[in-house]
Amino acid sequence: MSHKIMERFKQFVAPTYGRFPITLDRGEGAYVWDTDGKRYLDLGGGIAVNCLGHANAEIAQALAEQSAKLMHCTNFYHFEGQAQLAEGLAKRLGQGRVFFGNSGAEASEVMFKLARRLGQAEGRFEIITAENSFHGRTMAGISASGQKKLKDGFAPLLEGFAHVPYNDIDAVRSAITPATVAVMIEGIQGEGGIRPASAEYLLGLRALCDERNLLLLWDGVQCGHFRTGSFQSFQGILGDQIGDFLPDAVGMAKALGGGFPMGAVWISVKHADVLGPGTHGSTFGGNPLACAVANKILEVIDRDGLAANARALGQFFLDELARLREKYPTAIREVRGLGLMIGIEMGGGFGSFDNSKPAAVQWVFALHEAGLLTIPAGSSVIRFLPPLNLTQEEAQAGLDLFEQTIQKVIE
Ligand SMILES: Cc1ncc(COP(=O)(O)O)c(C=O)c1O
């Protein structure tokens, strides 16, 4: 069965992804099953998407009820679900308004357009982003992202993006030109290998952007929506130092819809009218189905204290992984992360590996065999991005499978 499906993929599906040879059939909570009946503990969470796990009954019910009531109505009209969701997101950030789209890349696009529109009168259009950043796969997204491999073969790229080393405020300062209009960063670089911003960097960026009249654009697509234990990661990174720190716009997607495709951008009240009527739009953005799901997710996260769960289980993972690192230093080089956004820098070159492939991919394969799904990042990092409602037992089960795999690989 799985073999036949994979063959049909080869024949009919565009080959843009390096897919693993797993054919999934169904899921329940933190587990998924393939078409041969093999069970996997899913610590990848669909790359930080399945925040309430698989086949969540409350999401399914919200979706079914909304689909029987009003599935789609275009953004020419109003409906309560979108108002409720915009209010729910704005309340967690500050005074501002929300634009809804369908994905993370589109959230980035909104922020680019916001910056360009704002700077246009003064001839400012340049956006400074970080090396190793990832902001999506559209032409503007790859132009903005600080990773060469995303851009190869797609010239000419969109002009007006400069990349500087991450967590280096002096590098940002030096890159500012009279044409600069914004700085855009991820709070924790996800695709770049789980690299958190420091509190000093964030405070420095805010001060610098204020001083030079630049927008601070926040890509919270992967690190947002409570993944790190707070709604947006800057809230956790800054903690007591937060004061009145706020970016000028915050991009969201992934866990916002928990598996229903959606994206959003919160824009601070000061700039909320920059993108006025006719300047941007989306047929499906924030449609009734998406909003019903996202509203339910916010309700469940609050009701079940899932931000606290992400903080507690995140610390548990970090402590246990540090212990495993001491025990297996050739396999685990470094552990980084915040909440349930964890990156593990893995060693390579083991005898059982096909060393023509990057170490990260080799480890992901080995973990599949043990029944554990994780997500590679770059050449040597694997990520844990599990559901926010993961239990302590499931976390322990994941660590056990991880340790067993390490033992098997390095023996
Ligand atoms: C930080 C960040 N921004 C943007 C995106 C693009 O999101 P999407 O794949 O939904 O377009 C991603 C996806 O991984 C991401 O991690």
Image: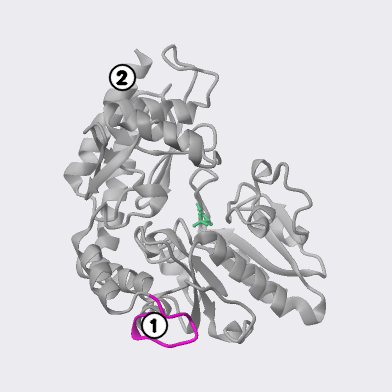
Q: Which residues are magenta?
A: 72-83
Binning the other alpha carbons within 10 Å of mark 1 as few (below 14), some (14 to 19) or many (20 upward) gives some
Question: Hey, what amino acid is under mark 2?
Answer: Gln
Of the image marks 1 and 2, the number of the one nearer the N terminus: 1
**Which image quarter: residue 83?**
bottom left
Report the Cα–Cα distance between label 1 and label 2. Answer: 49 Å
**Residue 75 lies within the magenta run:** yes
Circle nearer the viewer, 1 or 2 = 1
**Which image quarter: residue 32?**
top left
Q: Position of residue 4 (x, y in %)?
A: 36, 31
Q: Position of residue 100 (x, y in %)?
A: 48, 74
Report which residue position mark 1 lands on: 87
**Residue 277 lies within the magenta run:** no
Residue 20 visible in the snapshot: no
Identify the residue at horizontal 47%, vertical 25% (top origin).
Answer: 347
Question: Does residue 228 sit above or below 94 in this rendering?
Answer: above
Can you tell which mark lies on residue 407? Answer: 2
